[in-house]
Image: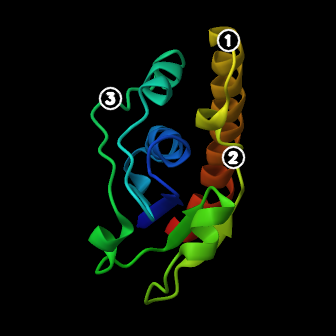
Amino acid sequence: MNILVLCTGNSCRSQMAEGYLKHFAKEQAIIYSAGVETHGVNPKAITIMQEDGIDISKHTSNHLDEYQNIKFEYIITVCDNAKEQCPFFPGKGKRLHYNFFDPSKVEGSQEEIHAAFTKTRNQIKEYCKDFVKRELPKAIA
C-alpha cells in the first residue's frame, strides 16, 4: 500500500507526517512525502522529531511530479495550499486533508519557535496514529 503526504514545500509538516506514518504503519505501507515546491528539509523539523525519537535527518525534499506514476491508496494533504494545488492523480486513491499550522512561519524567541514546532509535531503525531489505527486495518483486511 502506498501513501503520499503532500505539503507546500515538503520541508516541515509533510516530513513530520512521513516520519510518524512510517513509525506507526511499520511494514503495512510505503510512505512518500512531496511538495508542490521543494524547500529542503527544515532543520527545526529534524530536531523536534529527534526529541520524540523519530529520525527524519535522511529524508529528502521531493516534488510531487516525481511520484506521478505511482498508484497511491491514500493522498493526505497537510496544508490548504497543497490541497488547492494538488494535481489529479490517476486511480482511486482516497484523499484526506488536515490543515496543520506551519511552525516555520513563526517569528519570535527560540522558546516561542520551539513551542510552535512542538505543538504542530504533536498534532501531526496524533493525526498519524489515528489514521493508521482507523484506515490501515481496513485497507489490509
Query: In the rendered structure, which disc, 2 or 3, sits on the residue that comes first in sequence?
Result: 3
Q: Nearer the viewer, residue 13 or 103?
A: 103
Tag 2 secondary structure: helix
Q: Nearer the viewer, residue 75 or 129?
A: 75
| 1 vs 3, front mark | 1
The residue wearing badge 1 is: 109
Whether 44 is drawn above or below 87: the answer is: above
| 1 vs 2, front mark | 1
Residue plotted at (53% across, 21% down): 48
Tag 1 secondary structure: loop
Residue plotted at (31% across, 40% down): 59
Whether 108 is drawn above or below 83: the answer is: above
Task: Check contact, mark 1 vs mark 2: CB within 8 A.
Answer: no
Inspect this view and state whether residue 141 appears.
Answer: no
The residue wearing badge 2 is: 127
The amino acid type of the residue labelled 1 equals Ser
Quadrant location of the N terminus in the rendered image? bottom left
Residue 103 position, x and y percent, is 64, 34
Tell me the CA gap for discs 1 and 2: 27 Å
Label 1 Cα crowd, 10 Å radius (few <14 / some 14-19 / many 20+):
few
- Asked which quadrant contains residue 134, the reply is bottom right
| 111 relative position to 39: left or right | right
Q: Nearer the viewer, residue 33 or 84?
A: 84
Tell me the CA gap for discs 2 and 3: 21 Å
Tag 3 secondary structure: loop
The residue wearing badge 3 is: 57
Residue 96 position, x and y percent, is 66, 68
Whether 109 is drawn above or below 75: the answer is: above
Task: Check contact, mark 1 vs mark 3: CB within 8 A.
Answer: no
Task: Check contact, mark 2 vs mark 3: CB within 8 A.
Answer: no
The amino acid type of the residue labelled 2 equals Tyr
